[in-house]
Image (cartoon, rainbow, N blue to C red):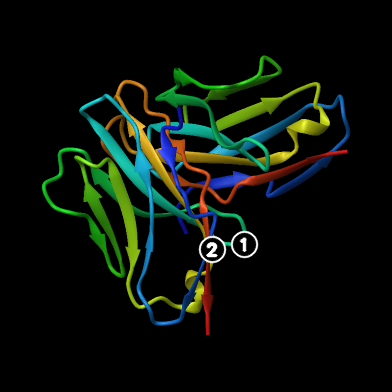
């Protein structure tokens, strides 16, 4: 079974609008972390935001926020006031069981911001 | 700039050859991870080192090996290269084990011809 599911292969959004990128996950481990990374066309992986499973509040970093719904096992990324530079691939990832710290990635969502 | 440095950025080599990819983690980070990104497999975890010791292993082929040196830089060795090994190879580092962010380098794009 997929551990990380990103159901939107591609999205087109008008500049300055907010956008939500979906991510659902599957784990039986009570302790885990969820990550979002941005990969522009140049190829580097840019860390955006992190949410721990025990964090009481949703994580926020500037224009990025994570809508964490633990019971539904979803960790959607919200980008407010989108900019042309936000056009990129976005990956959701999970780390479970801190004794095994690999990140498991979803298949990604390609976001295109339209001027 | 994530602070993680990978060299070289691009590498083109022939089938059957051996290459070494190098990674310098962020200053003070003890944990280094290697990932492979290919079109058909997506992003796959290969191996993790923590303070010089192998800590976790993923889907790493026997033809591939890695090590972390006392100065904490790491090398990924790929041998008997095949066309299917063409991919973007990432190194990531984190400060400690456990609940912390992992920062990625810019990757090494390997093309096997």
Residue sitting at 88 percent across and 34 percent down?
B14
Cβ atoms at labels 2 and 1 below 8 Å apart: yes
The x, y position of residue A54, in whole percent, is 15, 38
**Residue A91 x %, y %:** 47, 50
Image mark 2: chain: A
Q: Is residue B72 above or below residue A55?
A: above
Chain label for disc 1: A
**Distance between the Cα atoms at labels 2 and 1?**
6 Å
Percent position (x, y) of residue A7? 47, 49
Vertical arrangement, residue B73 with respect to residue B62, above or below: below
Place residue B85 in its image quadrant: top right
Crowd around label 2: few <14 · some 14–19 · many ≥20 (10 Å): many
Q: Looking at the rendered structure, which numbered label has been put on residue A41?
A: 1
- In the image, A90 versus A46, the foreground residue is A90
Residue B85 is labelled as none
Front in this rendered view, residue B78 or A55:
A55
Residue B28 appearing in the image: no
Residue at horizontal 54%, vertical 47%? Answer: B5
In this rendering, position of residue B16 left or right of residue B25: right
Question: Is residue B80 found left or right of A71 in the rendered image?
Answer: right
Q: Which residue is mark 2?
A: A88
Q: Nearer the viewer, residue A57 or B2?
A: A57
Observer able to see residue A54 = yes
Residue B10 in picture, x, y percent from top left:
73, 48
Question: Callout 2: helix, strand or loop?
Answer: strand
């Amino acid at each position: 079974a997929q551990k990380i599911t990103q159901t939107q292969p591609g999205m087109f959004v008008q500049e300055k609008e907010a956008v939500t990128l979906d991510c659902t996950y599957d784990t039986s481990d009570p302790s885990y972390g969820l990550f979002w990374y941005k990969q522009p066309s140049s190829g580097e992986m840019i860390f955006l935001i992190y949410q721990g499973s025990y964090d009481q509040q949703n994580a926020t970093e500037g224009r990025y926020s994570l809508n964490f719904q633990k019971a539904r096992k979803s960790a959607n990324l919200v980008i407010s006031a989108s900019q042309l530079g936000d056009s990129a691939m976005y990956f959701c990832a999970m780390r479970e069981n801190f004794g095994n710290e690999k990140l498991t990635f979803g298949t990604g969502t390609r976001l295109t911001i339209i001027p | 700039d994530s602070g993680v440095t990978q060299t070289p950025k691009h590498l083109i080599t022939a089938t059957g050859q051996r290459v070494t990819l190098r990674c310098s983690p962020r200053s003070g980070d003890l944990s280094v991870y290697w990932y492979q990104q290919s079109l058909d497999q997506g992003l796959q975890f290969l191996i993790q080192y923590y303070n010089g010791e192998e800590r976790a292993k993923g889907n790493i082929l026997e033809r591939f090996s890695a090590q972390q040196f006392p100065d904490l830089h790491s090398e990924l060795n790929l041998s008997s290269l095949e066309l299917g090994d063409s991919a973007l190879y990432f190194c990531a580092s984190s400060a400690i084990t456990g609940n912390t962010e992992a920062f990625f380098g810019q990757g090494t794009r390997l093309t096997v011809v």
